[in-house]
Amino acid sequence: MYVKKTIIFSMIVALILLTVGCSSDEANDENIQTIEAVLKTNFTGPDEEFKKIMEKENWVEDLRQYEENLYSDYFANDSFYLSYVSRYGSGLWYEPMQNNYQLKVNNIEFENTHSEEIIYNFTVDVEYQKEGSELSEVETVTGQANLNNEYKVENVVIEVNDLIRAISE
């Protein structure tokens, strides 16, 4: 009887540990999916729609709507979203567009900081290629993203200076 209770108890503990472990992995996956979506969107382009908007005389409202469609769903609220697009957003495409470059994400690495808050460090390998050229180069961009329990971004910091400098030369 004692052996039977021990086996049942062990199975319940194992099941609980497995469930908790999977839940944690699933949360990490959803957090990573959110950050990855924002980074891939921001470091792939500029696309034709952005270029057409920037050719317009009165482009401000069209650009606002364009960025809202691209990014707002990933952010916890309008304040976090507006902070992001004012620092990064399609502004990261302006220099590549002016210098006829296309950006493309080659790889993204994530590291959970395992702090009390949901914070991930990331490294993005961004390929940049001059339009009409077969040669491309890669610049590494680093940063950090903070998320909430609903897998929404609250803050992002991205070190883009080296990429912008490389494209500007």
Image (cartoon, helix red, strand yellow):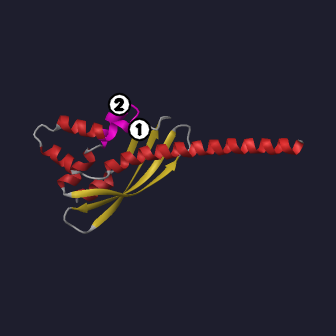
Q: Which residues are magenta?
A: 70-88
Q: Residue at x 23, y 54 (%)?
A: 96
Q: Residues within 10 Å of mark 2 (few under 14, many from 20)?
A: few
Circle 2 is placed at which residue position? 79
Inspect this view and state whether residue 86 appears: no
Q: Residue at x 28, y 65 (%)?
A: 136
Q: Residues within 10 Å of mark 1 (few under 14, many from 20)?
A: some
Amino acid under disc 1: Asn
Residue 50 x %, y % = 21, 46
Residue 159 x %, y % = 37, 49
* Above/below status of 15 relative to 45: above
Which quarter of the figure is the N terminus placed in?
top right
Circle 1 is placed at which residue position? 155
Contact (Cβ within 8 Å) of mark 1 with mark 2: no
- Total marks drawn? 2
Kind of element beneath mark 1 = strand
